[in-house]
Image (cartoon, rainbow, N blue to C red):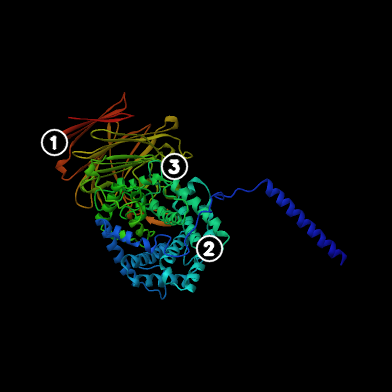
């Protein structure tokens, strides 16, 4: 008995001492917690709904705006079309994957179904749509579990679904019973808790992580959950809100360069904005900070869409992990509408119309649902303006290392050129494409980007130097960009893109000169050298569409466009010698990306030219033509003292271009 008392006393003394020590340590030093200093006392979300995105009192103004411009009236039409389609969705059982979305986009599908139906009910005063949205919302509550990987397989699907649940709850609230509201809130709480368990790398306050779409999609959703759970007495809600504000604010400030280019590309920057703008809008309406207004650089985000839209079929130049034939979704227009950028809006609408995807105005079940904000972003409706009507410039340099140029803003025959050599703030969707170029003319693509999966440099118009390819995370640099009366010069440097452990690439510089017309063409010079001045093999690759037709023409090659509009001749020179252009057989070649195997033949065809020299000086000339008799006469001379080319291109009955191509510059004089 005595021993037990002594043991109890010792335990109490020990515990008391530990508490004293802990208190003293706490008073002296408190561990740093990210975003803990973000004030929350002013945040006051409405307990009634709908309120997070609009109230019923605001509906007349929204409806009036939806009728104010042709493109907004088209959006109304597409919303109703989608709502009628989604009325047919079965909820017995609820199918997470269906004809509109796959399992990987199940959460985005949920957003679109409850969002479209719910919003359409208010917009068109049609109760049946709201009843269907309620049916879907409760089916998800009853038939899925936030922590079930077969339902929501990763943190992104959980994030998307959380945003969908909050959107649905806010819209459907008036017709939910008290018990149904509580069931929905409990499910949202489970989703929020799951997001706290899955934060992993996306919770790290590192610049590269902040700039990734994953981070803002994750924490934007957590912030939305915190808003609807604000009065539920959850001690975690404050921390959730601080983290959400900090992470979304961090994304908006870091996903793009100073000139507005989101380096993940036109799909992923839009997905990131889809995950951040919905929360930011609801936060502002809840008396929180206006995160969008804190980042006026968002006004430039849609410039990527403007400069990447191609002259035909509404295609959007891919670059990195994006797809040329899939347009940017609605969220990509956040900056255009908030900051009144009509040329950006023109490019997006042109892409949708020319690709026969105007239905995307009403949302797409594979993307974040933000369609209602087309009637709400910005102080007033924005009308698209064709850049041609303003005699807008024809070339643009983005600070992070992309240059785009074109011959005209009108007509599918217009020429379009790009060169990429720079840095990506987050490397997850980076491709090994430094110094790569693309070229479109006469309604065809001759040098193209391979789209989403083929990220290796062997799948881009790049050099292989001494058997070495570029590496994941390698960087390039646009050293110079100059416009003149005939075209645009771009100089890219990519020596830091190669694996230095395998060969010491001293420099790898490409000088590209895009001539706008009257016959558009592209000339580029590659200078590369490894340390110790030894002769090495250098292979120049030229990537084109998989359904284009390739043939040889002596030492040159002909690329015939699949649309039947035009062809182009590719010639390659190394000092005094014309180098044979080979047609590479990639029909049996494949690659592995993220653990999956792919066949190159689905994405590209490839030409190549090979030399074995010390510091090879490769000159590539690509000239499009409609009929072969239209091809100009080409004469190439090389000066051994200055290491310079003189390229003379004579267009019969028209003009002669004389290009001086030095190790440092390319200039054109026309006769």
- Which residue lies most toward the top here? 641
On screen, residue 413 above or below 10: above
Q: Nearer the viewer, mark 2 or mark 1?
A: 2
Q: Residue at x 47, y 64 (%)?
A: 152
What residue does disc 1 label? Answer: 652
Residue 635, disc? none
| Label 1 CA crowd tier, 10 Å (few <14, some 14–19, many 20+) | few
Query: Closer to the camera, 167 or 267?
Result: 167
Which residue: 50% across, 70% down?
182
Q: Residue furthest bottom?
A: 92
Residue 40 lies, with reference to residue 307, above or below; the image says below
Q: Secondary structure at mark 3?
A: loop
Q: Give the image location of residue 223, x and y in percent.
A: 49, 57
The residue at which mark 3 appears reads as: 474
Residue 38 x, y percent position in the rendering:
53, 50
Circle 2 or circle 3, nearest the eye? 2
Residue at numbered disc 2: 231
């Amino acid at each position: 008995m005595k021993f037990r008392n002594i043991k109890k006393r010792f335990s109490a003394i020990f515990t008391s001492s530990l508490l004293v020590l802990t208190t003293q340590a706490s008073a002296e030093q408190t561990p740093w917690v990210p975003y803990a200093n973000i004030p929350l006392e002013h945040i006051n979300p409405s307990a009634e709904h709908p309120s997070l995105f609009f109230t019923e009192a605001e509906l007349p103004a929204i409806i009036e705006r939806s009728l104010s411009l042709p493109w907004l009236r088209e959006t109304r039409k597409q919303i109703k079309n989608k709502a009628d389609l989604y009325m047919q969705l079965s909820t017995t059982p609820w199918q997470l994957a269906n004809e509109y979305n796959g399992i990987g986009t199940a959460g985005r599908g949920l957003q679109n179904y409850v969002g479209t139906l719910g919003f359409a009910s208010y917009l068109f005063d049609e109760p049946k749509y709201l009843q269907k949205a309620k049916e879907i919302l409760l089916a998800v509550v009853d038939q899925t579990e936030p922590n079930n990987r077969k339902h929501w397989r990763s943190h992104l699907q959980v994030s998307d679904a959380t945003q969908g649940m909050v959107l649905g709850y806010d819209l459907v609230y008036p017709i939910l019973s008290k018990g149904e509201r509580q069931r929905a809130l409990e499910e949202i709480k489970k989703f929020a808790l799951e997001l706290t368990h899955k934060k992993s790398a996306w919770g790290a306050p590192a610049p590269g992580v902040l700039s990734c779409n994953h981070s803002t999609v994750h924490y934007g959703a957590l912030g939305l959950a915190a808003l609807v759970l604000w009065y539920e007495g959850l001690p975690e809600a404050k921390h959730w809100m601080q983290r959400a504000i900090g992470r979304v604010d961090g994304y908006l400030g870091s996903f793009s360069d100073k000139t507005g280019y989101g380096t993940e590309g036109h799909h992923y920057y839009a997905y990131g904005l889809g995950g951040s703008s919905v929360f930011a809008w609801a936060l502002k309406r809840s008396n929180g900070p206006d995160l969008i207004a804190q980042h006026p650089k968002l006004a430039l985000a849609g410039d990527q869409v403007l400069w990447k839209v191609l002259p035909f079929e509404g295609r959007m130049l891919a670059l990195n992990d994006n797809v040329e034939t899939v347009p940017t979704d609605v969220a990509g227009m956040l900056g255009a509408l908030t900051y009144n950028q009509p040329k950006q809006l023109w490019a997006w609408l042109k892409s949708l119309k020319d690709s026969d995807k105007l239905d995307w105005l009403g949302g797409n079940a594979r993307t974040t649902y933000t369609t209602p904000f087309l009637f709400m972003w910005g102080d007033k409706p924005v009308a698209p303006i064709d850049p041609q009507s303003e005699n807008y410039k024809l070339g643009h340099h983005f600070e992070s290392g992309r240059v785009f140029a074109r011959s005209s803003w009108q007509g599918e025959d217009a020429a379009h050129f790009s060169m990429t050599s720079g840095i990506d703030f987050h490397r997850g969707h980076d491709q090994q494409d430094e110094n790569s170029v693309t070229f479109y003319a006469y309604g065809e693509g001759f040098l193209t980007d391979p789209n989403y999966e083929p990220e290796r440099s062997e799948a881009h118009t790049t050099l292989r130097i001494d058997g070495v390819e570029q590496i994941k995370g390698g960087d390039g640099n646009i050293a110079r960009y100059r416009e003149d009366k005939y075209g645009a010069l771009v100089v890219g440097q990519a020596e830091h893109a190669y694996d230095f452990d395998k060969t010491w690439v001293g420099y790898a510089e490409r000088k590209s000169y895009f001539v706008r017309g009257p016959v558009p063409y592209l000339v580029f010079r590659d200078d590369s050298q490894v340390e110790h001045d030894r002769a090495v093999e250098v292979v120049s690759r030229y990537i084109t569409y998989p359904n284009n037709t390739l043939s040889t023409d002596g030492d040159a090659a002909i690329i015939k466009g699949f649309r039947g509009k035009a062809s182009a001749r590719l010639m390659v020179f190394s000092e005094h010698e014309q180098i044979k252009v080979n047609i590479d057989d990639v029909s049996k070649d494949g690659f592995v990306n993220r653990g999956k195997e792919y066949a190159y033949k689905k994405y590209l065809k490839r030409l190549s030219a090979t030399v074995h020299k010390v510091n090879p000086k490769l000159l590539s000339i690509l000239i499009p033509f409609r009929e072969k008799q239209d091809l100009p006469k080409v004469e190439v001379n090389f000066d051994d003292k200055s290491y310079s080319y003189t390229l003379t291109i004579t267009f019969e009955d028209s003009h002669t271009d004389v290009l001086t191509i030095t190790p440092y510059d390319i200039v054109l004089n026309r006769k």
